[in-house]
Amino acid sequence: MHVLDAAHLFRLAVERAPAGSVLHAVGDEGVPIHEIAEVIGRHLNLPTASVPAEEFGFLGGILAVDQPASSTLTRELLGWRPVRPGLIEDLDKGHYFG
């Protein structure tokens, strides 16, 4: 999710969310790790390859598990809608690799 969408949600949460609310700041749902790696690799001129999760230690287990998250309830509660580019589109613009 774009930082400006996150900032907007944070402001809405402070101003409007009922005390004790659990909010999820999810702009893109279900972005595969390999897509993130491919964009980063392309911008850094590095090859990407699939490797066994065990090679990443404890982090491999986290990355290998499907962890769906949704901001549906957050959107309904606060009327929040991310409007900026999603993760892959934002990464692909290249300004993180300057």
Image (cartoon, rainbow, N blue to C red):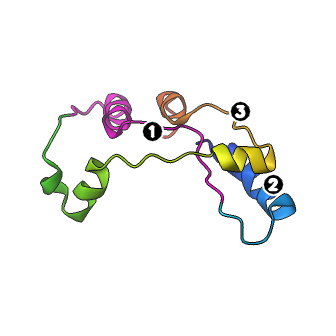
Location of mark 1 (residue): 97
Magenta-highlighted residues: 23-48
Q: How far from the left and from the top, in percent, is residue 44? A: 33, 34
**Mark nearer the N terminus (2 vs 1):** 2
Identified at 52% across, 36% down, the residue is 87
32 with respect to 91 (left or right): left
Q: For residue 12, which quarter of the picture?
A: bottom right
Amino acid of disc 3 = Val
Say what secondary structure mark 3 lies in: loop
Location of mark 3 (residue): 83
Q: For residue 10, which quarter of the picture?
A: bottom right
Please tell me how many numbered marks the rendered image carries: 3
Say what secondary structure mark 1 lies in: loop
Amino acid of disc 1 = Phe
Question: Which sits in the foreground, 42 or 49?
Answer: 49
Report how far apart the C-alphas of labels 2 and 3 lie in the structure.
Answer: 15 Å
Location of mark 2 (residue): 12
Question: Which sits in the foreground, 39 or 94?
Answer: 39
Farthest bottom residue in view:
20
Q: How far from the left and from the top, in percent, is residue 39? A: 38, 31
Q: Residues within 10 Å of mark 3 (few under 14, many from 20)?
A: few
Given this view, does label 3 or label 1 mark the residue nearer the observer? 3
**Mark nearer the N terminus (3 vs 1):** 3
Q: How far from the left and from the top, in percent, is residue 5? A: 69, 44
* Whether residue 28 is situated above or below residue 58 in the rendered picture: above
Q: Which mark is residue 42?
A: none
Q: Residues within 10 Å of mark 1 (few under 14, many from 20)?
A: few
**Quarter of the N terminus within the rendering:** top right
Amino acid of disc 2 = Leu
Say what secondary structure mark 2 lies in: helix
